[in-house]
């Protein structure tokens, strides 16, 4: 793949000494096999309503169950997948798996939506909205039970094209979420063009709200921005009860983080989280 972003992306890939182009190619070939052999798995992390602690949705987070290396986190192979274009079949696999699992927990009596992360590359592939529509039909999932998480950077990427593709997906009834908000390029102008159902406040701000007045001001503003746009504000990376309580008081809608639940296979997700009491 000769992408417009060139080869500079390779430096992103680190860990066990990988970073040389030879090993890079090995990872790509292995990943292709992993997809064929069914070595990828999805773990799910709950998003809860901050007011009552009820689970609203599960976010699908991909892992590679590697025969020798064990459970490999996405940060170790997604850059290779993006660079090689394998992200396209990988996302299709994730979507189909996630929608199938959603049908599974619905049958078990849980009305949770499923959130799927989509990379900037997916938005550039012609026919992506059609693929989403086909997978909804194939699995029999109502569109409102699917949310696609797109990073701010992906929105900023090829601006207008990305906004148009997202508009087409939203028109299906699928929810659109802006991931890692505040961490990427400032692209407030894209929020005018894209119908957004959820804004996820980046963990970097959320984790600092107790100690840092500036982070508090930013989080409060993003909550207000989300509400002004008719969207939900979701805080990511909530690790302490103190932060949870602060978010409730700040009027944030939903939360996600290790305090509430780590990513696990879906049958292990607890349907409710006990809301920390105000002291
Ligand atoms: P993300 O979408 O921002 O997902 C949140 C990441 O933060 C996850 O890491 C999650 O395990 C971690 N996390 C959740 N709560 C906490 C917390 O309280 N504290 C801390 N320190 N971390 C927390 P993970 O699973 O390693 O995923 C990393 C990134 O990989 C994701 O970031 C997402 O950008 C990407 N990713 C994961 N699965 C997929 C996928 O299926 N497709 C695409 N395109 N990207 C994916
Ligand atoms: Ca996400
Ligand atoms: Ca995120
Ligand atoms: Ca993140």
Image (cartoon, rainbow, N blue to C red):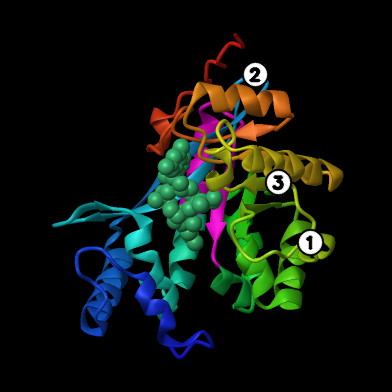
Tell me the distance, in whole angstroms, between the alpha carbons under discs 3 and 1. Answer: 11 Å
Which element carries disc 1, helix, strand or loop?
Answer: loop
Name the residue that disc number 3 marks. Answer: 198
Q: Is residue 79 left or right of residue 195?
A: left
Residue positioned 44% across, 29% down in the render: 269
Q: Which mark is residue 217?
A: none
Horizontally, residue 199 falls left or right of residue 102, namely right
Q: Which residue is mark 2?
A: 52
Callout 1 crowding tier (Cα within 10 Å): few <14, some 14–19, many ≥20? many
Q: Is residue 231 visible?
A: no
Which residue is pictured at 42% across the width and 78% down the height? 9
Category of crowding for the residue at label 3, using alpha-carbon neighbours closer than 10 angstroms: few (below 14), some (14–19), many (at least 20)? many
Query: Where does the C terminus fall, quadrant-wise?
Result: top right
Report whether 211 appears left or right of 94: right
- Label 3, label 2: how far apart the Cα atoms are: 18 Å
Name the outermost residue toward the top: 279
Q: Nearer the viewer, residue 98 or 215?
A: 215
Is disc 2 surrounded by few (<14), some (14 to 19) or many (20+) residues within 10 Å?
A: few
Q: Which residues are magenta?
A: 96-119
Q: Which residue is mark 1?
A: 194
């Amino acid at each position: 793949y000769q992408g417009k972003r060139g080869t500079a992306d390779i430096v992103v890939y680190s860990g066990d000494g990988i970073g040389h182009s030879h090993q890079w190619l090995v990872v790509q070939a292995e990943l292709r096999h992993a997809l064929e052999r069914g070595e990828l798995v999805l773990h799910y992390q709950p998003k809860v309503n901050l007011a009552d602690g009820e689970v609203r949705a599960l976010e699908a987070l991909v892992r590679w169950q590697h025969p020798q290396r064990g459970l490999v986190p996405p940060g170790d192979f997604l850059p290779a997948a993006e660079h090689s274009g394998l992200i396209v079949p990988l996302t299709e696999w994730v979507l189909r798996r996630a929608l199938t699992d959603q049908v599974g927990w619905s049958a078990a009596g849980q009305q949770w939506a499923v959130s799927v992360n989509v990379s900037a590359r997916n938005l550039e592939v012609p026919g992506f909205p059609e693929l989403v529509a086909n997978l909804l039909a194939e699995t029999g999932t109502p569109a409102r039970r699917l949310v696609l998480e797109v990073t701010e950077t992906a929105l900023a990427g090829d601006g207008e094209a990305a906004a148009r593709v997202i508009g087409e997906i939203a028109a299906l009834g699928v929810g659109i979420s802006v991931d890692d908000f505040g961490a990427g390029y400032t692209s407030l102008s894209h929020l005018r063009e894209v119908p957004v159902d959820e804004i996820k406040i980046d963990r970097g701000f959320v984790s600092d709200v107790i100690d840092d007045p500036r982070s508090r001001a930013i989080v409060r503003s993003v909550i207000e921005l989300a509400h002004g746009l008719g969207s939900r504000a979701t805080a990511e990376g909530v690790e302490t009860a103190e932060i949870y309580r602060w978010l409730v008081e700040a009027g944030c809608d939903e939360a996600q983080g290790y305090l509430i639940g780590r990513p696990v296979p879906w049958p292990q997700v607890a349907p409710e989280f006990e809301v920390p009491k105000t002291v």
